Image: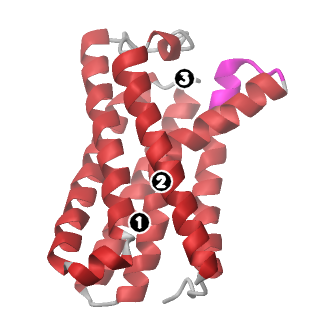
Amino acid sequence: MKKQKILSGLLTGVTIVFILYALVNNYIVDPGAESFLSHKTGLKRALNLPVWLNVMYVHVAFACIAMAAGLLNFSNRILEKSRKFHRITGYVYLLSVLLVVLTSGYMAPYATGGKISSMAFNVLNVIWLFITIMALVQIKMKRISRHRNWMIRSYAFCFTNMFIHLITFLFHQGFGLVYATSYTIGVYGSIVLLLVIPDIVIRMNGTSTTN
């Protein structure tokens, strides 16, 4: 129980900080994404900046909504008080994930690092959507424990951007690799972490990954 409270508190803190950072950075500090776009070189497709920015705004907004909705739905207290609210929030999460995946699909061809990064983003989108649908299927079949495990796996993908930039920073600033190469490593590295970390969390919670 103590371990679960620590994990819950850590998750809540990281989620709130990251949501605030994403909103402030993308809508106030750098609404034109000039810093991020400065690393995009040698694009195969012409970037329609106004359209790309609008898609990016939608992407960020629903990514934050997904993070907030997912966090609320991991609360046992909320679940005990109102299963209806839990269900509604769950569908909000599902819709948000779908919109994040769709907008990511639009932006993937313009990914920093070129085609190899674009392919990784498409793989990420397919995996995230599949895992989220699995979570929905499990709850429809009344398999509560399996639903929760698949939701843990799905929710981890809300932190894709955070992991990408942490890994990118490590390889770019720490090892001196060029930004585009570091970013590509970040995308592929995040895929590995997002598949491994949730199962570690599930085991720490004492719940079998097959439940």
Q: Nearer the viewer, residue 201 or 11?
A: 11
In the image: residue 122, left or right of residue 87: right
Mark 1 in CB contact with mark 2 (< 8 angstroms)? yes
- Residue 187 at least partly seen: no
Q: Residues within 10 Å of mark 1 (few under 14, many from 20)?
A: some
Mark with earlier residue (1, 3): 3
- Residue 96 at least partly seen: yes
Whether residue 157 is in magenta: the answer is no
Residue 105's disc is none
Magenta region: which residues?
A: 176-183
Name the residue furthest right: 175
Q: Residues within 10 Å of mark 3 (few under 14, many from 20)?
A: many
Instruction: Kindly report which numbered mark, 1 or 2, lies closer to the viewer in this rendering.
Output: 2
Name the residue that disc number 2 marks: 157
- Image position, residue 78 (x, y; %): 29, 74
Type of amino acid at the residue the image marks with label 3: Thr
Q: CA distance from mark 1 to mark 3?
A: 26 Å
Q: How many marks?
A: 3
Mark with earlier residue (1, 2): 1
Residue under the point 44% across and 23% down: 25
Q: CA distance from mark 3 to mark 2?
A: 19 Å
Q: Residues within 10 Å of mark 2 (few under 14, many from 20)?
A: many
Where, by quadrant of the figure, is residue 50 drawn? Answer: top left
User: For the residue labelled by badge 1, is the local secondary structure a helix, a strand or a loop?
Assistant: helix
Residue under the point 26% across and 88% down: 141
